[in-house]
Amino acid sequence: MKDMSGLEGAFLHLETPATPMHVAALFLLEASAERSGDFAGEIRRQLLPRLALSPPMRARLAPMPLGFANPVWIDGGAPDFSHHLRYVVLSEAAGFSELEACVAGLHATLLDRRYPLWELTIIDGLATGEIALYLKIHHAALDGVSGMALAAALFDETREPAQVPADWSERIGAAENPGIGQRLGAALRQTAFQCVNAAKSLPAGLQLLAGLVKADAKDKSAGMRQNLAFGPKTPLNVPITGERGFSAVSLSLSGVKEIARRQDATLNDIVLTICSGALRRYLQEHGGVPRKSLIATMPVSLRAAGDTDTSIQATLTLVKLATNLADPLRRLHAVRAAAGAAKSLTTHARSVIPTDFPSLGAPWILSVLASLYGRSGLTKVIPPLANLAISNVPGPRRPLFLAGARVRACWPLSIVTHGLGLNITVFSYGDSLDFGLTVARAALPDVHSLARALTIAYGELQQLSQAGPVLPNTAPRPRHRVSKARKRDPESPPTAVSAATGNKASG
């Protein structure tokens, strides 16, 4: 039996039919002319023992009486594979767009809480001969970093499959079945522990906040003030339904690193700038670019190096994407400054950021709030604190294999909510950056248009880095009075290089 943290419980209780709270990954296995027989069946045979022996895949919820506190995790014993494993055959000679549509449909359905909170679907029928795996698991059970550790346990490092103990099924113990008294005792102990920890961290948190506010008053371009502001209203920030869209894009990791090297930026700076350029192009084609910059919420891992525990250890930060700047090079350096300020703030606050908090009564409160928020239409009225979510998760540099087939790509899928209808999550795998674009169709009906814009934005940055010198790495200049004519045009004047690349991209 394992206690659930306050943050894990929040993901559980905020879930509604319109806002499922699971994350997922789409793995694509290479085709092979030498393959024969029932390859999908061989994949299933390889995965069964690995899934059964993995603790997260056996963890089941044991609710509290009347749901007055977070449930506890218990070992559910051997998984019921007739429920967890699915097999889908696409229509004859299906293309990649059919695979994306299939995955979007799978991602829209809630996980059944009577079972461990995961499903794995083997998808066959692609015209290329490739086979896809779609694995989804509830975000209450793990975060992105621990999810990659789970993937490493399910796949092989070579084409030769790893040996599984012949008695693997006997190594799985019986399912736990704690009584009401045990669960109540666990809830009270956990609540007491959470309250004590919250009380201990409160003075340090207040002291840190006061220091940040004081520093912010001295330097208006740094710290919280750099990114803390409401974002503009866009078509992305509306009430949503449960219908999902998905598109996958892969870019060269070495190519992105080269851009980062030439621009004296980090890999994450370039990822954010690519997303910024794509969003700007998409909005130009769908209603216009807002005068204010879009703001992204970005998860930041709080894990120590080597920590692969499945509990969630992350927080959120906000980053301005400089979408109001027309010049891509100046946009890149504005994003770099904003991301640097966000990183500095998170680094300073790292020791006092809570991932656990008292949760007595939280299931009632959060469930009611989630239901009311979705029905109230408040997202139509209040300005968004963030316009979208962007996450960058490091993955394995070496290739993964399953049943002798190489995993060609690994695209993530994540969570969208009311008022936050777009989530861009990135996995680095081998020499590839695999972008997963998860959308609520009510907010972004044409996800493939955004995917195309993402590729164009990457090409634009490549050309800029090859064309000329970089800008100096300086903080953004303070704002000065501008003329009325300048106020009517919030975009920076494009340089000759950006204008040329923009014309080439649009052509």
Image (tube, grey):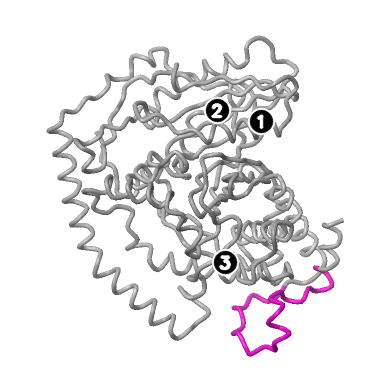
Instruction: Return the residue found at the far top.
Output: 37
Residue at the image position 28 percent from the left and 45 percent from the top: 363
Q: Quadrant of the C terminus?
A: bottom right
Disc with the residue nearer the chain's start (3 vs 2): 2
Q: Position of residue 481 (x, y in %)?
A: 63, 90
Q: Amino acid at mark 2?
A: Asp
What residue sits right under mark 1 in the picture? 99
Is residue 152 something one can see in this rendering? Answer: no
Q: Quadrant of residue 179?
A: top left
Q: Circle 1 — which element? A: helix
Cα–Cα span, label 3 and label 1 = 33 Å
Residue at the image position 44 percent from the left and 80 percent from the top: 216
Tell me which secondary structure the magenta stretch mostly adopts.
Answer: loop
Q: Position of residue 246 (x, y in %)?
A: 62, 40
Which class describes the residues within 10 Å of circle 3: few (<14), some (14-19), or many (20+)?
A: some
What residue sits right under mark 3 in the picture? 232
Cα–Cα span, label 1 and label 2 = 24 Å
Q: Amino acid at mark 3?
A: Pro
Describe residue 427's horizontal placement relative to residue 171 as left or right.
right
Counting labels gives 3
Q: Disc 3 or disc 2, which is closer to the eye?
A: 3
Q: Disc 3 or disc 1, which is closer to the eye?
A: 3
Residue range (magenta) = 471-498
